[in-house]
Amino acid sequence: MTMPALIQSHRKQVVETRLAKFYSAINQAIKLSEVQNGDKKYWDVVDYGWETDEEGNEDRSQPPKAAGWYNKYLKNYLKTTKIEYDNTYEGRVKAYFPDGSLMLFSSSSIIFYPEAKNYATVKYGESNNDRDRNQSGIKYFTFLFRPAGTSKWLGEKGVEPLLENSWNGTTEALWNDNALGCKQNVSNERAYCTKLIQMNGWKIPKDYPFKF
């Protein structure tokens, strides 16, 4: 193999290994937490945003609301090297893992970066920040935690790749959905790439449309 091919192969292996490891670790943490905190489907709902001061303004000098949930249910069961808070409108917990990966945890989703160094934000307006969606399915991967059964496809499972209730259950839709499909141009982000990789045993499919 040529040097570029070797580098590409190594990057793919890093993504595959860390995705599989994260999926196992986060769900094992949830199982361990259930021993202390009861069935996950009865856990508190993850709060959105930040506490407000006496004047009703968000107080971003304090941890976001999601931090309280994280500290109660996950902190003691995940091995991390550092915890920070993402100063966005959602109020996300940033958990760094020993293998060099990063989890962004919030009320809406769980974003996993196999390489924490690839974490970046793109500014929308003066106060809101969001991730660079052109890197979805390449530098970060999207998961959900909906244990109360509000998601049609996730049921009462733990952390799983994001699937919208509108998904028709086919592999073709995972590739070609116009909003979330694993293809070059989508209206949202390529969230379904994560499910395709999971279905392939946490291996990047041979016909995967992106390089690493």
Image (spheres, helix red, strand yellow):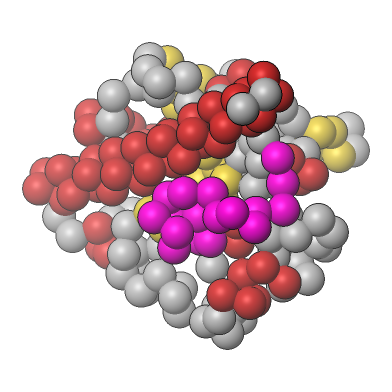
> Could you say which quadrant of the image residue 97 lies in?
top left
The furthest residue to the left = 35
**In the image, is residue 45 part of the stretch drawn in magenta?**
no
Percent position of residue 26, x then y? 32, 42
> Which SS does the magenta portion mostly show?
loop
Please state if 24 lies on the left or on the right of 54 as rendered: left
In this image, 110 relative to 76: left or right?
A: right
Labels in figure, total: 0
- Can residue 157 be seen by looking at this rendering? yes
Name the residue rendered at 56%, 23% in the picture: 116
* Nearer to us in this view, 40 or 59: 40
Residue 117 in picture, x, y percent from top left: 62, 19
Looking at the image, which residue sits at the far top?
A: 81
Along the viewing direction, whichever of 80 and 4 lies nearer the viewer: 4
Name the residue at 29% across, 24% down. 79
Relative vertical location of residue 148 with respect to residue 44 in this rendering, above or below: below
Which residue is outermost to the bottom?
Answer: 168
Which residue is pictured at 43% across the width and 34% down the height? 18
Q: Which quarter of the picture shows residue 165? A: bottom right
Judge whether 74 appears above or below 37 on screen: above
- The residue nearer to you, when weighing 122 against 2, is 2
In the rendered image, residue 37, in percent from the top left (x then y), is placed at: 16, 48
Residue 136 locus on image (x, y percent): 69, 46
If the image is split into quadrants, where does the C terminus sit?
top right
Q: Is residue 143 visible?
A: no
Q: Residue at x 49, y 30 (%)?
A: 14
Which one is nearer the viewer's eye here, 162 or 76?
Answer: 162
Residue 207 drawn in magenta: yes
Q: Quadrant of the N terminus?
A: top right
Which region is colored magenta?
194-211
Judged from this view, the residue extending furthest toward the front is: 1
